[in-house]
Image (cartoon, grey):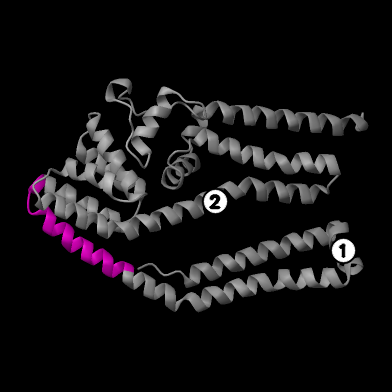
């Protein structure tokens, strides 16, 4: 009976991988919902006509209902819309599941230690979240850097006598991504019947940036009370540029601390690799015994915790 466990585990893992990959392939096929998403979130101008598109904005049910209402699923969906707008939640969860199953399959085939298998499963399963957080931070930084030029562009468009919705359309065509993507989505939602104020609020929530909130609040107030929006946008653009300049100065001042933290974290791993290369019989015991694996895992956790604390200390919000 024990001899049957390994083939059964391998077969079950391969089956789960095949099913996950098939679901990913199905989600990549073209569909009317995919055409809607391309029109509302792509960088360029879609060639599909409004008559071929449904007005509904609801996404197809991608996760079970009992999971969709969970707070962590809602946070993940929000981060996904900020980091990878064209990726559905179902596809992202399938990618996480596939990556988490690979270490189990390899461990069953090569008889890995159970602790090593669990650590590899956790690392591979969490890696998409790490990539998502990095992409989200990069995209928000690009939006903040492009926002002053976007507000200056919109201010010039308004001074030329165009409407605000026309300004959003011109921004989506003339400005670079990702800021053009957000304004294109807001304009397309408005062209499909959604009020411009509601689309603007959704755009501000989706971007989740302090500078972008200033822009959205100014536009919403002007829509209600009136006033010279072009002058307001010019003033906010100057303020955002000053904030960005100050943030870069702060980042330059804290670069030494961040670099020191990276060295401190990398030094033990490099030294362990050198010692293992010079004396593999002695340092190989860490990989051959459960106690050694636990010590290595504990050391990695402490190193990551130290890196996290250093990053928190050297990161200042302007």
Residue at coordinates 40% horizontally, 23% vertically from top-left? 32
For residue 290, above or below residue 35: below
Question: Do the numbered discs 2 and 1 sit on residues whose CB atoms are within 8 Å?
Answer: no
Q: Quadrant of the N terminus?
A: top right
Q: Could you say whether the residue bearing mark 1 is in a helix, strand or loop?
A: loop
Instruction: Please state which of residues 146 and 127 is positioned toward the viewer in this rendering.
Output: 146
Q: Main secondary structure of the magenta part?
A: helix
Chain-order first, disc 2 or disc 1: 2
Magenta residue span = 224-244
Residue at coordinates 65% horizontally, 66% vertically from top-left? 303
Say if the magenta span includes residue 274: no
Q: Quadrant of the C terminus?
A: bottom left
Residue 77 in view: yes
**Horizontally, is 52 left or right of 100 in the view?**
left
Query: Which residue is the site of mark 1?
Result: 284
Query: Which residue is the site of mark 2?
Result: 131
Gap in angstroms between the C-alphas marked 2 and 1: 31 Å
Mark 2: few/some/many CA within 10 Å (<14, 14-19, 20+): few
Instruction: Please state which of residues 277 and 202 is positioned toward the viewer in this rendering.
Output: 277
Q: Could you say whether the residue bearing mark 2 is in a helix, strand or loop?
A: helix
Residue at coordinates 54% horizontally, 38% vertically from top-left? 92
Which quarter of the figure has residue 203?
A: top left
Say if the magenta span includes residue 243: yes
Residue at coordinates 48% horizontally, 72% vertically from top-left? 314
Coordinates of residue 254 in the picture (x, y in percent): 46, 76
């Amino acid at each position: 009976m024990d001899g049957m466990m390994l083939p059964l585990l391998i077969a079950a893992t391969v089956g789960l991988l095949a099913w996950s990959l098939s679901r990913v392939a199905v989600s990549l096929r073209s569909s009317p919902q995919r055409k809607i998403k391309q029109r509302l979130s792509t960088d360029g101008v879609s060639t599909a006509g409004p008559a071929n598109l449904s007005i509904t904005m609801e996404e197809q049910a991608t996760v079970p209902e009992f999971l969709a209402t969970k707070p962590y699923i809602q946070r993940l969906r929000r981060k996904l819309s900020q980091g990878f707008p064209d990726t559905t939640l179902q596809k992202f969860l399938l990618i996480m599941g596939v990556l988490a199953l690979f270490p189990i399959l390899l461990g069953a085939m090569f008889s890995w230690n159970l602790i090593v298998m669990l650590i590899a499963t956790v690392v591979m399963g969490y890696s998409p979240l790490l990539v998502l957080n990095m992409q989200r931070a990069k995209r928000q930084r690009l939006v903040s850097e492009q926002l002053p030029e976007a507000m200056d562009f919109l201010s010039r468009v308004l001074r030329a006598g165009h409407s605000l919705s026309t300004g959003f359309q011109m921004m989506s065509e003339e400005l670079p991504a990702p800021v053009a993507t957000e304004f294109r989505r807001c304009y397309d939602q408005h062209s499909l019947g959604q009020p411009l104020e509601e689309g603007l609020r959704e755009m501000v929530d989706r971007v989740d940036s302090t500078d972008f909130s200033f822009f959205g609040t100014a536009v919403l107030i002007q829509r209600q009370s009136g006033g010279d929006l072009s002058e307001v946008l010019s003033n906010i653009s100057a303020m955002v540029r000053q904030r960005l300049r100050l943030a870069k100065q702060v980042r330059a001042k804290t670069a030494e601390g961040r670099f020191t933290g990276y060295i401190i974290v990398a030094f033990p791993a490099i030294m362990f690799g050198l010692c293992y290369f010079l004396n593999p019989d002695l340092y190989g015991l860490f990989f051959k015994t459960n106690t050694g694996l636990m010590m290595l895992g504990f050391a990695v956790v402490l190193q990551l915790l130290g890196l996290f604390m250093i990053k928190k200390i050297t990161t200042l919000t302007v």
